Amino acid sequence: MARIPYADPALPENAEAAAHIRSSRKGISHLHAALLNAPPIAAGWITFYDAVRFQSELSGKLRELVILRIAAINGAPYEWDAHAPIGLREGMTQAQLDAVTEWESSSVFDATERAALSYCDAMTRHIHVPDGVAAAIAGVLPPRQVVELTVTIAGYNCVSRVLEALLIRGDDPLPLS
């Protein structure tokens, strides 16, 4: 069970932020119900992650690959469960999904994917990206996509940290409204 109650989206103080979430996501997930305890944060969260996910030139496959790698590194099952099906829809293969946790010893990733995974590992595990890792990603992606990849990795590290700090799980009961 989560460490905080899931907010009721029907409460007047949550209505505007809940409508913003629904307009983007079609429903209110456990994460969003937790964030609704702070309505301005919940609304801003949606605006930010909509830009990351839906207004980026970065391929959906590469985006989901690094999100799943972050979930694996950070031990964030909610994040993994939410993004594994998206990864498959965006073009990841089941073999790639199965190999995310041990990508370095796998042959199912191309050079761009390997550079992105290395960049993701450096940002997630160490924060400071070694020059060689940064040069490798800059060698396969244009500057805009390097920024988008960097922000995606930073942002989804935030997601997993929020999920795990608050113990948000997909099988928790949500308010009925």
Image: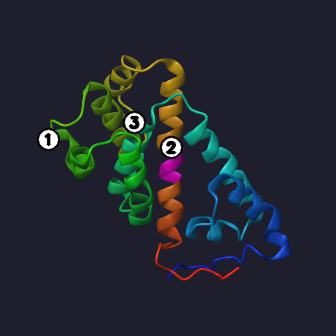
Q: Which residue is mark 1?
A: 105
Identity, as a three-letter code, of the amino acid under mark 1: Ser
Q: Position of residue 96 (x, y in %)?
A: 25, 44
The C terminus: image quadrant = bottom right
Q: CA distance from mark 2 to mark 1?
A: 25 Å
Q: Which residue is mark 3?
A: 62
Q: Are marks 1 and 3 in contact (CB under 8 Å)?
A: no
Q: Main secondary structure of the magenta part?
A: helix
Q: Earlier in the sequence, mark 2 or mark 1?
A: 1
Decide: is 25 above or below 8.
above
Is residue 48 something that shows in the picture?
Answer: yes
Q: Nearer the viewer, mark 3 or mark 2?
A: 3
> Horizontal placement of 101 versus 130: left or right?
left
Label 3 residue SS: helix
Foreground residue among 131 and 104:
104
Foreground residue among 96 and 144:
96
Residue at 22 percent across and 52 percent down: it is: 98
> Horizontal placement of 64 versus 12: left or right?
left
Decide: is 122 above or below 164.
above
Q: Earlier in the sequence, mark 1 or mark 3?
A: 3
Q: Position of residue 14 (x, y in %)?
A: 79, 69
Label 1 residue SS: helix
Q: Which residue is mark 2?
A: 154
Residue at 53 percent across and 32 percent down: it is: 148
Decide: is 138 above or below 106.
above
Extent of the magenta region: 154-158
Residue at 44 percent across and 65 percent down: it is: 78
Label 2 residue SS: helix
Does residue 114 show up magenta in the picture?
A: no
Label 1 crowd (10 A; few <14 / some 14-19 / many >=20): few
Identity, as a three-letter code, of the amino acid under mark 2: Ala
Identity, as a three-letter code, of the amino acid under mark 3: Leu
